[in-house]
Image (cartoon, rainbow, N blue to C red):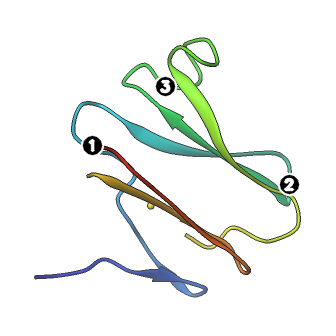
Amino acid sequence: MRIPVAGLWGGGLHTGAEGGWHVEIAAPEWPHHRVLLATGRGPWQGEHGESWWQVFDSSWSTLRATGRTLAVATSSDLTLWTRA
């Protein structure tokens, strides 16, 4: 079994899941990052609360690192979500 990892110097994790779900990173006020969870249509084509949701807002830490489990890691926090 291979476990994908990512860190300060690169690597990559999955951004999509079964059923068309995926995550997007938005940084309109860089270095302030927001993590968006979206359906197949994505956050750029639908309405907030219908096809995408903001699930994480990082204004104090830099974003470092994302099935059934969504993991968002910053330099100071780890947040996990899971679906049934």
Pointer 2 local density, CA inside 10 Å: few below 14, some 14–19, many at least 20: few
Q: Which residue is mark 1?
A: 84
Q: Earlier in the sequence, mark 3 or mark 2?
A: 2
Q: For the C terminus, give its image quadrant.
A: top left
Question: Dot 1: what SS?
Answer: loop
Horizontal relation, residue 80 to residue 20: left or right:
right
Question: Dot 3: what SS?
Answer: loop
Pointer 3 local density, CA inside 10 Å: few below 14, some 14–19, many at least 20: many
Going by the numbered disc 3, the residue's amino acid type is Gly
Q: Which residue is mark 3?
A: 42
Which residue lies most toward the bottom here?
Answer: 9
Which residue lies most toward the left here?
Answer: 1
Going by the numbered disc 1, the residue's amino acid type is Ala
Looking at the picture, does residue 33 appear above or below residue 62? Answer: above
Q: CA distance from mark 1 to mark 2?
A: 34 Å
Q: Are marks 1 and 2 in contact (CB under 8 Å)?
A: no
Q: Which residue is mark 2?
A: 30
Instruction: Identify which residue is drawn at 59% across, 22% down.
Output: 44
Q: CA distance from mark 3 to mark 2?
A: 21 Å
Going by the numbered disc 2, the residue's amino acid type is Trp
- The x, y position of residue 9, in whole percent, is 57, 87
Q: Are marks 3 and 1 in contact (CB under 8 Å)?
A: no
